Image: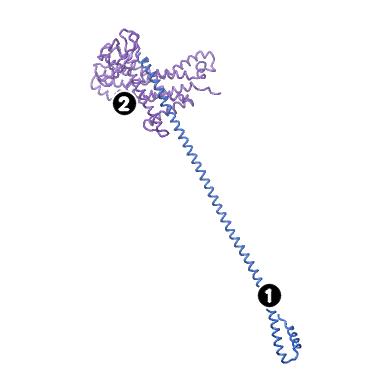
Amino acid sequence: MDLIKPDLGLLFWMLITFGIVLYILGKYAWKPILKALSEREDAITEALDKAEEAKKQMANMQAENEKLLAQARAEREAILRDAKEMKESIIAQAKTSADVEGKKMIANAKENIEREKVAAIHDLKNQVASYSIEIAEQLVRKKLESSKEQEELVNKAINNFHLN
Amino acid sequence: MAAKVSRFFNLKVFSLLAVLLTFFAVKMVAQEEPKSEHSNEHATEQTAEHPATAGHESGKFNAGEMILGHIADEHDWHIVGPVTLPLPIILYSEEKGLDIFMSSKFEPHHGEERSYNGYEMHKGKIALASGTSIHDFSITKNVASLFITAGLLLFVFLTIAKSYKTRKGKAPKGLQSWLEPIILFVRDDIAKPTIGHKYQRFMPLLLTIFFFIFFGNLLGLIPIFPGGANLTGNIAIPFFLASVILITIIVIANKHYWGHIIAMPGVPKLVLLILTPIELLGFVLRPFVLMIRLFANISAGHIIALAFYSLIFIFGAKSAVAGYGVSIVSVLFTVFMFCLDLLVAFLQAFVFTLLSSIYFGSAIEEPAHH
């Protein structure tokens, strides 16, 4: 039957045509197409991987930044605290040293005053004595011949004086 | 494997139905043939030579002749009405040597056997008047259709290949984006799962076969000039493609595969006497079934569509009213069948490629390490 008997002529042309088509398409179509497809797939996979990696890196960086920020904040806090402490200690030190110095100065002043006072008293004593002698001399000269006797008399009297 | 088999069980049932339908139709035609030849010799001759015009030129309409004429090969391509494209005829015989001439040289008178220069054409077959054997390498309608299909394949895929080069790494565009999913489908859903990591070796063959069948089927569905030939439904084409598959399997098959066919390991010698012939038969039967499936499906599609149209003329011959009435139903059914055939066009290309791919996969399968 014609319908199910392969026709030799058609088979012959099919062999030639299919062979040529297979060869040309295999070499100039399927190879570049499949290559381009797999290359594109690889490129897409790579790009996705890279994006994922970049995302991860970004997250890492962010975490690092945060860490750095926290560190900086802590450092600032510490510095501030230190400064405050230092200020307080300096103030306290200054206060104590001023106190001590003042006390010392006061003590010195008191000592000086005491010394000056004693000297002044001593001076005053001598002055008073010399004035008294003078006064007494003038008095005695008028009344006494010998001043020697008079002087002895006055000294005796002065020694009997005790200031303080 | 079992899952795959069950998945394509439906297809097999469908194919089987198509085969049955084809043979049923062929049988009907065969029964009708002698009757009509008896009743009207002239009409029969005419329908054989100009099947497409048979319906409206002759008084009597013979559906079987018309349908068979349409799905068979021809020496000239009838385009529309009286317009016919002459095709080159290439003949070789020991008596006359090589002879090349156009089919229009055959006197185009109707009803008679056409003859030219000692050659006689009868029902699309050329023979020598003297009766000696002749080799016919003519560019028939199917050969011309084969060239058109091949040309289309080359044009489409070389264009696409070029756009893959010019638009490297970019998203597909135009024709490229229409066919890329199909190429990826063949690669990812046919070749990769059935063959495994060595699939790349088979991609050119599988893709060429897939698109050859697909484009051939689609061209066959176009009723006007560039299409309309029953190329993939002509037994020679599925026969050739199945032979390619068989030869490829023979070339690539490894020891493991041959071992399982010739002497199934772990089977008693006595059983092998039965098993080996069965395995050998299966080895040849697999490509044979590939051939029959493609042939029957595509032919059946053509036969059914034409049969529905024949109904119009059969009823029209009885009464004009019946003819017009039936034509509505016929057109609706033909539209439905056409849609189904569009699906079949893809499906058959897919099934042929998938099964070939499965056979390739099993032929190069390495023995599992126990």
Q: Is residue B72 visible?
A: no
Tell which of A118 and B146 is nearer to you: A118
Please indicate whether residue B103 sits to the left or right of residue B295 in the image: left
Type of amino acid at the residue the image marks with label 1: Arg
Image colour for chain B is purple
Image colour for chain A is blue
- Residue B334: % across, % down: 31, 24
Tell which of A136 and B170 is nearer to you: A136
The residue carrying pointer 1 sits among few (fewer than 14), some (14 to 19) or many (20 or more) residues within 10 Å by Cα, namely few
- Residue B251: % across, % down: 47, 18
- Residue B163: % across, % down: 39, 31
Q: Residue at x 27, y 23 (%)?
A: B327
Q: Is residue A83 visible?
A: yes
Report which residue position mark 1 lands on: A115
State the mark number for residue B132.
none
Looking at the rendering, which quadrant does residue A15 occupy? top left
Tell which tag, 1 or 2, sits nearer the viewer. 1
Report which residue position mark 2 lands on: B335
